[in-house]
Image: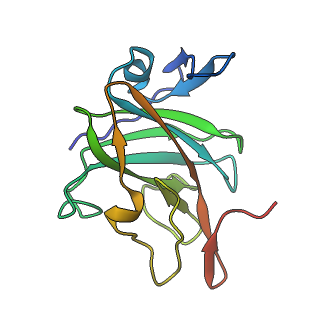
Amino acid sequence: MRKFVAPLFALATVVAPGSAAPASVVGSDAAACVAGKPSVEVVVSGFKQPAGTIKVTLYDGDPKRYLVKRGKLHNVIVPVHSTAPIEICIGVPAPGLYAIALHHDLNGNDEKDRADGGGYSRNPKLSIFNLKPGFNKTGFRVGDGPTRTAITLQYVRGLSIGPVRS
């Protein structure tokens, strides 16, 4: 499994279907979204602070490998400089079923701390007793070109987990 860190200059422009203005897509895999290859354009929103990094982790449709150590297919890591939504591209090997897990590492120490945020494709409800939803709640289909998915980050708030309150 390779770990990718996107440099600040790794920006690309892509026109999302049905939109008039191009969106800025970041990440080491941005070229896959621009070229129309099988990929996922992950729109991440709900940042608690403009700091640290966001890690996008891709899993295939095999439930035995989902959310287990060494089960991931690929990571894309990008710096966070704003609380505005960010669009990150992650390439997939072929059309099929996939799931995305996010980790907002606020202090950039590459560990999961209590202040960090996270989320999953399809935005399943999380609780302190259920931090790892099943593939059936997060999986989605990717076709021959880029598939767009929106994920809202969630953070621990006392004894609950949820999006940042406005």
Q: Residue at x 61, y 37 (%)?
A: 86
- Figure check: 98 above or below 92: below
Please state which of residues 2 and 14 is positioned toward the viewer in this rendering. 14
Give the image location of residue 63, x and y in percent: 22, 62
Q: Quadrant of the C terminus?
A: bottom right
Please state which of residues 9 and 159 is positioned toward the viewer in this rendering. 159
Q: Residue at x 37, y 24 (%)?
A: 145
Say how the picture is coloured. Answer: rainbow
Q: Residue at x 56, y 34 (%)?
A: 87
Q: Residue at x 39, y 71 (%)?
A: 132
Q: From the viewer's perspective, is 150 left or right of 20?
A: left
Q: How many marks?
A: 0
Give the image location of residue 142, x and y in percent: 34, 37
The answer to which image quadrant residue 36 occupies is top left
Give the image location of residue 56, x and y in percent: 42, 46
Q: Quadrant of the N terminus?
A: top left
- Figure check: 163 above or below 159: above
- Figure check: 110 above or below 78: below
The answer to which image quadrant residue 136 occupies is bottom left
- Figure check: 135 above or below 41: below
